[in-house]
Amino acid sequence: MGENMGNLRRTTMCGLLRRENIGQEVVLMGWVQKERNLGSIIFIDLRDTTGISQIVVDNTISEDIFKKAEKIRSEYVLAIKGKVRERQSINKDIPTGEIEVLVEELKILDVAETPPIYIKDDDNVSESMRLKYRYLDLRKPKMQANLKLRAKTSKVVRDFFYENNFVEVETPMLTKPTPEGARDYLVPSRVNPGRFYALPQSPQLMKQLLMVSGMDRYYQIVKCFRDEDLRANRQPEFTQIDVEMTFVDVDDIISINEKLLYRLFKEIKGIEIELPIKRMTYKEAMERYGVDKPDLRFGFELKDISDLVSNCDFKVFTSTIENNGVVKGINVKGYAEKFSRKDINSLEEYVKTYGAKGLAWIKVTDEGITSPISKFFSEDELNRILERLEGKDGDLLLLVADKLSVVCDSLGNLRNEVARRLGILSDDDYSLVWITEFPLLEFDEEENRYVAKHHPFTHPMDEDVCMLESDPELVRAKAYDIVINGDEVGGGSIRINNSELQARMFKALGFSEEESKNKFGFLMDAFKYGTPPHGGIAYGLDRLIMLFSGSTNIRDVIAFPKTQSATCLMTDAPTFVPEEQLEEVHINVLD
C-alpha cells in the first residue's frame, strides 16, 4: 500500500537538474526506471516527463530509508527529498549525467506490478501489446516527445491564426449525414425514433455557412470521422486544422498558408523554408511523377517512350499501344549495380500490386546493355530509348506498359519504393510543392457516373465552366494540395458561391433536384441570401506531426489510436451494449 506525500511538495523535475544545482536541496517525484542494489548503497533512476535523475540511497544516512528502498522495483512511484551532488561516474548519454541526488527522505507513493512491456523506446514489443497497454507505452520518452510536439504545433497554429484575424469556431459533432466521399459514422437519436445524426467527415458545410454568416476568417483544430476501410496510416477518427476565408481566390489562400508553413517549420524544426513554395499542376505531376503527391527529394522521373517503341518487335509494348495504352519508364540513375536480378524480380512483384502485368528493365554498363528484352529492339531503337531516358553507364531503366492509369500508378509508386530501398531519403530534408488545377470530376465505373475529385462544392476554373455539361472530364478545379516529401498534408479549394453553378454541379454529379435538396437543402437555402466568394484548406494534423517527428506510423503521434480494423485494444471498443440500451434508441440488431 502506498504512502501519501505528507509535507513533500515537488520542487523541480527529474530531467532539469544540472551541475549548477549541486548543493541544492530538492524534492523529486516520478517512476522508477530501474534500481541497482550494491549492498550498502542503492542507485535508482527516477523518471518523469522531463527525463531521468539518478538518486542514491546510502545505508549510512538512514537504515530505515535503506530498508524501504530495498523493496523498490521498476515503475514504483516515489517522492524523494535530498541534496544534489556531483556524480562520481559521469553519464554523457543523459543531460543529468553529471549529478545525482543523495536521498534524505523517501516515500513510496504507489507500488507497481511487473509491467507487461518495457518502458523504453527500443523495447521491440508487438504493436498490439503497445496498444493494449497504451498507458504504459505512453510513458516512453519518444511517445511523450511526440505528444509534446503535437501540443507545440497546435499552439503555433493557434498563435498564427489569432495574429492574422482568424476566429476559432467550434462546429457540431452531431450533424446531418451527407455524401462526402466516405461512409458516415451514424448516431441514433433517442428522442427522434428512427432518425440518425452523423459524426462529421469534416466541417465542410458548417464552415461554408460561417462564411455566409460574415465570419470572414475561420479556423478550428477539429476531430473528423470516416467509416472507411483503413490502410496503414489511416485512422477512423483524425484531426484537421480546418481553415476558411471570404473574398479570396487561389493565390490568397496559398499566400496566407505559406506564411503558416514557414512559421511551423521555423518554430518546430528550426528550418526557414524558401518562399514562395514551388507550384505544379496536376497534369504536370502525373506526367512527370505518376502521382498527384510527388516526392521531389530525388529524380527518377517518368518518361513516355510509346512513340519510340510502337513499331518494335516486342509484342508486349506494341499490343499495349495498339489498345490505347502507353509505355513509360524511369531511370534509376547511377544505381544499377545496387540491383541484382533477384532485386529486380522483387520490384516486379511490387508493381503488380498496382495492377501492372510486369516490369521490363535495361541495365546500362560500360560494356554495353544488359536486358532480357534487348533482342526485340534494333540498335537504333535502343539508342533512342537511352537518349529519351538519359541512360548512361551505371543506370537502371525500369519500364511498364499498360493503360495510362496503371502505368502512372505503378511507376509513380515504384520510384518512391526504389528510393526507400536505396536509403537515399533523409528525414531532415524537406521538399514542399503545391499541386494545383486538379480535375473537378472523375468517372466512377462502379457507380457509372461522375463523382467529385474533392467534394461537390469545389469551384471549376472560370475558363472551364462552359465544359461542365459537354466535356466534364476536361474541367479543372480551383483546388490545391500542399505536398511535403510525397505526403499530402493539406488540401482545399475555392468553393462555389453561386446557386445556379452549384445546381449545375449537382446535375453533373448525377443528383436529381429532389436529391440535392434533400442532402444539401439547408446550404442551398443559405446561398440565396448573398454568399461571398470563399475558400479554404484543411491540414491533417496527425500527418504534420508524423512529418515533424520523423515517424512512419500514424499511431505513434496519436495518444489513443485505433488499430487497422478500427478497434481499441485498450478499451475493447467497439463492443456490444445491453438490449435495453438498444431499445432506448429504437435499434434492433439482427443476428
Image (cartoon, rainbow, N blue to C red):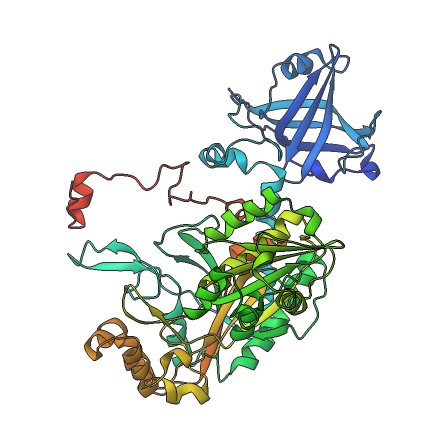
Left/right placement of residue 84 relative to residue 372 reads right
Position of residue 202 relative to residue 102, above or below, is below
Which image quadrant is residue 346 in?
top right
Percent coordinates x, y for residue 33 in the rendering = 64, 27
Percent coordinates x, y for residue 506 in the rendering = 29, 78
Residue situated in front as seen by the camera: 173 or 359: 359
Position of residue 591 relative to residue 308, above or below, is above
Which image quadrant is residue 439 in?
bottom left
Number of marks in the rendered image = 0
In the image, what residue occupies the spot 69% across and 33% down? 52
Residue situated in front as seen by the camera: 357 or 380: 380
Quadrant, the C terminus: top left
Left/right placement of residue 67 relative to residue 366 reads left
Residue situated in front as seen by the camera: 75 or 86: 75
Position of residue 172 relative to residue 582, above or below, is below
Which image quadrant is residue 382 in?
bottom right
Residue situated in front as seen by the camera: 249 or 54: 249
Percent coordinates x, y for residue 399 in the rendering = 56, 59
Percent coordinates x, y for residue 120 in the rendering = 62, 32
In the image, what residue occupies the spot 59% across and 55% down? 361
Q: Can residue 403 be seen in this view?
A: no
In the image, what residue occupies the spot 71% across and 38% down? 15
Q: Can residue 463 be seen in this view?
A: yes
